[in-house]
Amino acid sequence: MITEQFDAFLSELGGAQGAPLPRLASCQIQALARGSVLLPQGTRQTHAFFLGSGVLRACHYSDDGQEHCKEFYFPNELCFLYASWLDDRPAEYQLEALSPVEVLKVPLSLLALPQWQGVTLALMKQQLLYKEEKEAFFLLNTPQERYLALLERWPEWVDSISQAQLARYIGISPISLSRIRRRINQS
């Protein structure tokens, strides 16, 4: 059940230490269809989404119709836009379902509560480490090395998102990704 997954997630972050965290009364379970928008681009973010099943993404849509994928989210991850939350500004990205999903809608106001300070600090540390790792991933690797790293470290990505989405995420065209995959399969 998604609430048990969320409890385990919080425990990993250190949230189970001390007093129990008030959460379930203010959280809501939602089942959403593929293509559902959880947070429209340009709106204020009030909730995070703990993903129980399915795949979400954060994507920016430019005025000329281009889409720029910031991130993909998989089960047992908490999905929200840190910069929008910290600055209380409208979201630059849209959060949307790439498949049918089950989420636990978590009010971001909980992160300001004293009981949640340990969780909030752990989330910030986790996000900082992830951002540093992602920056190195893009700056220190060729497109082929990026693809190979995804195959090795996050095989669920390759199995769960389209090749076009994967190519855009690693900063190449779908045609270039096809060439890379062909070269790898020939070796």
Image (tube, helix red, strand yellow):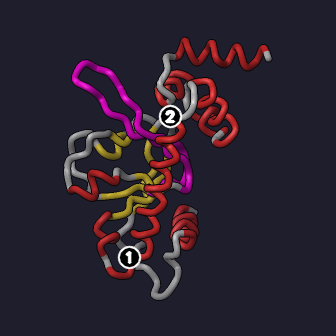
Q: On the image, numbered disc 2 is attached to which residue?
A: 138
Q: Residues within 10 Å of mark 2 (few under 14, many from 20)?
A: some
Does label 2 or label 1 sit earlier along the sequence? 1
Is 73 magenta? The answer is yes
Image quarter (top left, top right, bottom left or bottom right) of the N terminus = bottom right
- Which residue type does callout 1 highlight? Gln
Asked where in the image residue 141 lies, by quadrant, the reply is top right
Question: Residue 68: x percent and y percent?
Answer: 37, 29
Is 23 magenta? The answer is no
Image quarter (top left, top right, bottom left or bottom right) of the C terminus = top right
Residue found at the far front of this picture: 140
Query: Residue 13 — which label?
Result: none
Q: Is residue 163 left or right of residue 118?
A: right
**What range is drawn magenta here?**
50-76
Question: What is the distance, in whole Å, between disc 2 and disc 1 at their CAs?
Answer: 32 Å
Q: In terms of depth relative to the viewer, which is nearer, 171 or 12? A: 171
Instruction: Give the residue at x 66% y 42%.
Output: 153
- Which residue type does callout 2 highlight? Phe
Q: On the image, numbered disc 1 is attached to which residue?
A: 117
